[in-house]
Amino acid sequence: MNQKALRQDTNAALWGIGATLFLTFTIWMAAPLLKDIVFLEDKGASWYFWQLPERTAMGVFSAWFFYGLHQITMWGLIFYAQRAKPTYGHKLHNFNWYALGLNGFFCVLHIIQTQLWYDGLAQHVSIWSAQVSVVVMLIWVLLMETPRRGLFFGKKVPFSKKLIYAAKKYHGYYFSWAIIYTFWYHPTEATFGHLMGFSYIFVLLLQGSLFFTQFHVNRKWTLFLEMWVIVHGTLVALESDNNMWGMFFFGFAGIFIITQMHGLNFTKLHKWGFTLLYLVGATLVAIKQGPMFYTVLPRIPVVDYIGVFILAGILWGIAKLVPRAVNKEE
């Protein structure tokens, strides 16, 4: 195998990151071309603002039809890949090329669909469905990575091998749904929050396209994807008027301290350094916002860790229906 083939997955990832920047820039450049829309009054946290005042037939059809095509093709590729039982390597498999091409096609298609008919899936489903789908995906990663890095300060929870096998085998189907559903939920608007969100979705689609490659399981890369939510959640919160940015930043950063940093070869000095920075930062914010800020810190970690055990219970039930196999399937 030549050196070029050995680096094929990394090269594809670098090109994919470039494509992410290009697609995000395209959304921003295309925003002025959107028709002037008189949006309905914002009705609060449960209301999604960026939707037409009245549904249109083509808006409804295009969003759901293109979403359905995107979803079915990706699920089909995952099923095909798992049946093939390929080895993890640096060379791309044929299904990786198909996934990269199809995801790229649907990304461009969604930008065009927004320009023509605007509406995403938001006309029919709650904003909470899109947000919760991504939260569950992040919780799923915490569960799936427990055997390698532990759950609480490097300490492992003795989840059964059969449960973890089910989590790994079926995570691709769920992750694909959560990402593609969220992608088609939103029109490709160019607000700061939308641009941050779409850039995150693009790299997650890239990650999903590189399944069964060494890059897909590169620990630094996967940690980067997990931690992107710190930046995204914090900046979107800063854009709003609710002053909840601290809950997102320190909540997700707390999960890094409790769980995620223990998955890499950080020394004890590094870990104590990260922890000290976290505590000092939280204290400085608490001095400014008041001691009640400390009650905000555990909200996201508590929800996520409770979610890990709820998800484990659900997958344990599914695992009872799945024959155990000792292999390297996703």
Image (cartoon, rainbow, N blue to C red):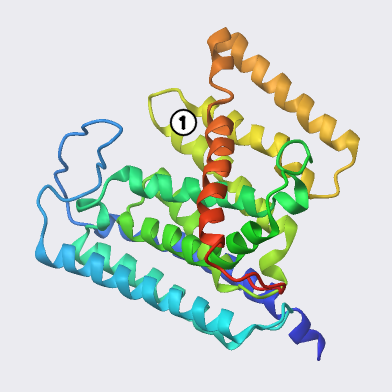
Residue 256 spot, x, y in % from top left: 68, 39
Tag count: 1
Q: Is residue 21 visible?
A: no
Residue 194 spot, x, y in % from top left: 39, 49
Q: Residue type at mark 1? A: Leu
- Asked which secondary structure carries label 1, the reply is helix
Please tell me which residue lies in front, 258 or 238.
258
The residue shown at (38%, 25%) is 241
Q: From the viewer's perspective, is 28 left or right of 64? A: right
Say if 319 sits above or below 250 in the image: below
Residue 59 spot, x, y in % from top left: 17, 63
Locate the N terminus and report the quarter of the image it occupies. bottom right
Q: From the viewer's perspective, is 174 left or right of 10? A: left
Q: For mark 1, does the 10 Å Cα neighbourhood hold few (<14), some (14 to 19), or many (20 or more) residues?
A: some
The residue shown at (40%, 78%) is 73
Q: Is residue 118 visible?
A: yes
The residue shown at (63%, 48%) is 142
Please tell me which residue lies in front, 177 or 252.
177
Say if 65 sits above or below 257 in the image: below
Please tell me which residue lies in front, 234 or 67.
67
Residue 126, image quadrant: top left
Say if 13 sits above or below 313 in the image: below
Q: Which residue is farthest front?
A: 320
Residue 242 spot, x, y in % from top left: 39, 24
Disc 1 target residue: 238
Please tell me which residue lies in front, 311 or 234.
311
The residue shown at (65%, 73%) is 329
Locate the C terminus and report the quarter of the image it occupies. bottom right
Residue 250, image quadrant: top right
